[in-house]
Image (cartoon, rainbow, N blue to C red):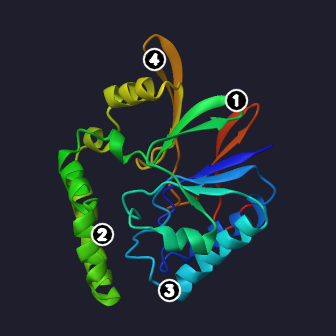
Amino acid sequence: MTTLFIADLHLSAERTDITDCFLHFMQQEARNIDALYVLGDLFEMWIGDDDDSPFLQQIKHAFKQLTDSGVPCYFIYGNRDFLIGSRFCQETGMTLLPEHTVIDLYGTPTLILHGDTLCIEDEDYLRYRKRVHNRFIQWLFFCLPLTYRQKVGDKIRSGSSKNNKEKTTSIMDVTPNEVVRLMAEQNVVDMIHGHTHRPDVHHVDVNGKAATRTVLGDWYHHGSVLVCTPDGCKLETRDFSKKNQ
C-alpha cells in the first residue's frame, strides 16, 4: 500500500531531463499504487487546455495510461498552472481538487495544498494572485489567440523570475502563523505542500497538539517524491541520469 505525492516539476519542452525522469516515474514507480497526488506547478506555464503541442500530448498520455490502469490521480493547481481546466482533466483522467483539501491518508486526516497561499508576507504576489484568479480576467485571457497567450505567459514567467531574485528568503517562505491558523481551521495535525522548493519535514505546535508539515521538493536538479505507506511517509529523490533505477 503506497501513495505518492509530487509537486513543482515545472515541466517544459526545454527541460528534457525532467521530462524523461517524470515519464520513467509514471511508467514504472507510479504503477500499482493506491493514488498519485500532484500538488501544483506540474508545468512551467499553462496557457490553456487548447494547447495541443506534441510535448503536452506526451504528458497527458502518460497520465491517461496511468488512470486507465486503475491508479487514481489527483491534482491541485499551483501558481504556474492554475488555468488547467476540465478538458485537461477529461483527457488525462485526473481529478481536480480544491486548493485546500483534507484527505484520509491511511487513517490520518491530512491537509494537502500547493502552498502559495501560506506565503502571506509576499503581498505583491498575493495581489497578483487575486488578479489572475479573477474569472473575468481569465475569460479575457482565453479570448486571445494561443500564440499571443504564449508570449504573455513567457513575459509573466520572466518577470516572476526577476522579482523573486529581489525578494528576501523569509518573504518567499511560508508564514508560520498562517500554517498554524490553517491547520487549526481544518482540524488536522498533518500538512503536505510544495511551492517553496525547500523539501523538509517541520514539527509544528497547533494549539498544543504536535503537528507535522511536510514540504515537497522541486524537480530542477533531481526528482522529488514523498512516499507514504501505512507505516509513515518519507521524502525521496530520483536521480536524472539514473532515472528511478
Residue 104 appears left or right of 69: left
The mark nearer the N terminus, 4 or 3, is: 3
What SS does tag 1 mark?
A: loop
Residue 32 appears left or right of 107: right
Quadrant of the image for the N terminus? Answer: top right
The mark nearer the N terminus, 3 or 1, is: 3
The mark nearer the N terminus, 4 or 2, is: 2
Q: Look at discs 1 and 4 and give the one toward the viewer.
A: 1
The mark nearer the N terminus, 2 or 3, is: 3
Reading the image, the residue beneath label 2 is 157
Please provide percent x and percent y for residue 149: 30, 81
Q: How crowded is mark 2: few (under 14 residues within 10 Å), some or many (20 or more)?
A: some
Reading the image, the residue beneath label 3 is 52
Residue 239 appears left or right of 171: right
Considering only vertical position in the picture, is 221 above or below 24? Answer: above
Please, what is the three-letter code of the amino acid marked with disc 4? Answer: Asp
Considering only vertical position in the picture, is 220 above or below 149? Answer: above
Reading the image, the residue beneath label 4 is 205
Q: Look at discs 2 and 3 and give the one toward the viewer.
A: 3
Please, what is the three-letter code of the amino acid marked with disc 3? Answer: Asp
Asked whether the residues under the numbered discs 4 and 2 touch, taking CB atoms below 8 Å apart as contact, a structural biologist would say no
Quarter occupied by residue 171: top left
Residue at left 44%, top 28%?
Answer: 183
Residue at left 45%, top 57%?
Answer: 77
Please, what is the three-letter code of the amino acid marked with disc 1? Answer: Gly
Considering only vertical position in the picture, is 75 above or below 174? Answer: below
Q: Residues within 10 Å of mark 1 (few under 14, many from 20)?
A: few
What SS does tag 3 mark?
A: loop
Q: Residues within 10 Å of mark 3 (few under 14, many from 20)?
A: few
